[in-house]
Amino acid sequence: MPESGQLSVNDRVLLHLSRFATDIQPEEQPAESTQAGIAFAVGISRTHVPRAVKGLIKDGLVEELTARVKGHERRMNVYAITAEGLKNAEVLWRTVLDDVFSVITDGNVVRMMGKDIESKVGKKKAVVAVSQMRDGVVQVDENRRMPVRDLKDAPTPETFYGREAELAAIDEFMDSDAKVLVMLGNRGSGTTALARKFVEGLEDQDTLWIPLSEASTAKHIESKLVDFGRNVRKNVEGLQDVLKLENATFVFDDYFSVNDEVVEFFTALVDSVDDAKVIVTARQETPAYNWFYQKKHTDSGIVRELKIKGLDQVSAKRLLGNELIEKDAFRRIIMMTHSQPMVLRMLKEGDFNGLKKNTPFTTEEIRYLLFLKDKTQ
């Protein structure tokens, strides 16, 4: 155990997970047991969680599971304390009771024994406070702040089907050492909807959504980032401080037709991003001169690409809204639309004008598609 008044990351993770110990694993695990939940509670980067729990797993104190998580639709990797781990946590806590800590209470920093902290706030809150200690200081008077989530410029969530593999790939990016994820797809392929779906689950992350367009300027983008950063942490002075924010995710939506200064801004961003994560939805047809990263960035792992194609057939049929569609009619629709979510949604809604405006289909082809989507077996 580290010096008096200090706990190792592994010790704090063990104490944190001990709060959710159960004799029988529940159908849904608490969000606090995910990698993001542990990172948020213990105060480490999400990418460091697997490293932190590796020794605990090796010693049989913690086990890694794939389970459903409260508030999330898909199964996720979670960590649960074992019976042996719970015993170790109880021994650790008895040691904590006799140790002395620097504690913020009533606005002052004082020295208190663990048993006095427990007496002051109760065991449950004391375990939380000690496991969440920062820089050797335990805070018992205030709860940790809620994450800052600015999604006012994000599209309204739509009915969403499939994409389990893509969502898992984004999860993997968030847990990796990569800094930037570029989601590539043709117009209508659903990159925006996929990113929007993913950020719904980032309840423990400081999250900012910034839409891009031809009118976007580097100055405006930087201003939004810095203003957001200052809402997260008061000592943020500029862009570099923003990019160092742990547990922060920035989503830039629809990178396609942007001016030279925005290209240069993103080029510099790739080399500057630190602890934050950046997700960019981009069109496959983006002109070569507008790309902001190079092969060296993907080769080194700083940038990851996720190519988004059409929906799987089960999800496409559900989005189309006709589960009993005639087999050959469905095959023709898939062949013509390439299972692009935007087109399938417009077909479902019978949006002739939307299809005319946003797709390359002729009037006759649109009428034919609308006819096919209503055919049943």
Image (cartoon, rainbow, N blue to C red):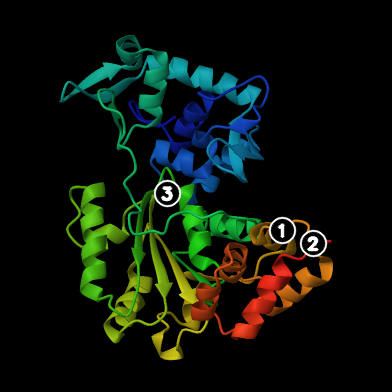
| Secondary structure at numbered mark 1 | loop
Q: Earlier in the sequence, mark 1 or mark 2?
A: 1
Q: Which amino acid type corresponds to the residue marked 1 in the rendered image?
A: Asn
Q: Is residue 338 visible?
A: no
Residue 337: image quadrant is bottom right
Residue type at numbered disc 2: Thr
How many numbered marks does the figure carry? 3
Name which residue lies at 42% across and 83% down: 291
Q: Amino acid under label 3? A: Ser
Marks 1,2: beta carbons within 8 A: yes
Give the side of residue 46 with respect to residue 229, left or right: right
Say whether residue 198 is left or right of residue 264: right
Q: Is residue 288 above or below residue 157?
A: below
Name the residue that disc number 2 marks: 376
Q: Badge 2: how crowded within 10 Å, few (<14), some, or many (20+)?
A: few
Residue visible at 47% across and 74% down in the picture: 282
- Identify the residue position indicated by label 1 in the image: 322
Mark 1 to mark 3 CA distance (whole Å) = 44 Å
- As rendered, which of 8 and 187 lies closer to the eye? 187
Q: Residues within 10 Å of mark 3 (few under 14, many from 20)?
A: some
State whether residue 51 is above or below residue 181: above
Q: Earlier in the sequence, mark 3 or mark 2?
A: 3
Q: Is 372 situated above or below 115?
A: below
Q: Which mark is residue 45?
A: 3
Tell me the distance, in whole angstroms, between the alpha carbons under discs 1 and 2: 8 Å
